[in-house]
Amino acid sequence: MNHKPYKMIAIDVDDTLLNDDMQITAPTKLALTAATERGVIVTLATGRMFASAQNIARQLNMNVPIITYQGSLVKNLLDEKIIYERSVPTDAARYLFEYADKNKLHLQIYYKDELYVKEDNQQIKDYAAMSNIPYIVAEDFASFIAKPLTKMLIIDDPAKLDVIAVELKASLGAALHITKSKANFLEFLHPEGTKGHAVKSLASHYGCDLSQVIAIGDSWNDHEMLEVAGLGVAMENAVVSLKEIADFITRSNNDDGVKHVIDTFVLQN
């Protein structure tokens, strides 16, 4: 464990900061406020789009850059200045469009912080309800291939996605970062569009050493940031593979796990 005080905390949103009722509890808000009063930079690191993450960050009265789209876009909360940005390489995007079409998969894409789909279906309705974000049904869906897409996402049965992930990793390899944010969401980003790359970029932006960074998460897409942070924390409700690489396992998202980390490592320092 390092002995320098921690200067930055990067926190995943779904199933980490939010409990199962999609709320940030009052005790957790108080702990985050206490940390910022000590000069600690608190940021969110999420697969969500900026508009969706912004709604959550506003509840915390934070004025910092937030890590969105798994790390493909880091943008200031208030003035919306971009700190870091990566887009899906065009050749890989074209391959995914064709693959989804051929295999009749639900593909959704993110361009300029808007969410686009080819057709209105149950997957997008459920997704929009969960993330509290509108979507656009685009008749010219294929025309987006050439545009700088921040993220692409396939929604399907978890077991089916596991098979697809292996297949696409074999085909696209180093051209893409492929990860899951939830069991039924398979996400595709620029190879440097990870939470790990974004945390590094933000730490350097603030002049923090990575040893002074805490990263807290629960899912597959949090691996990279737990690996680069001085203190990598997995939630009690995290996937097993994340717990295996964590330096510390905190309480669950329904038991103020984020507050427990701040109490233990920041406020007690």
Image: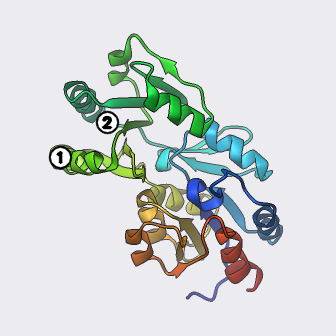
- Which dot, 2 or 1, sits closer to the camera? 1
Instruction: Identify which residue, 143 or 101, lies in the foreground.
Output: 101
Q: Is there a contact, CB below 8 Å, between mark 2 and mark 1? A: no
Query: Residue at label 2?
Result: 89
Residue 167 - label = 1
Which quarter shows the C terminus?
bottom right
Where disc 2 sits, the SS reads: loop
Q: Residue 243 location, x and y as percent?
A: 44, 74
Q: Residue at x 50, y 64 (%)?
A: 218
Which mark sits nearer the N-terminus, 2 or 1?
A: 2
Inspect the image, locate mark 2, and give the three-letter code of the amino acid beneath it: Pro
Q: Residue at x 28, y 27 (%)?
A: 97
Q: Residue at x 66, y 76 (%)?
A: 261
Inspect the image, locate mark 1, and give the three-letter code of the amino acid beneath it: Glu
Residue 257 appears in the rendering: yes
Residue 37, by quadrant, is bottom right
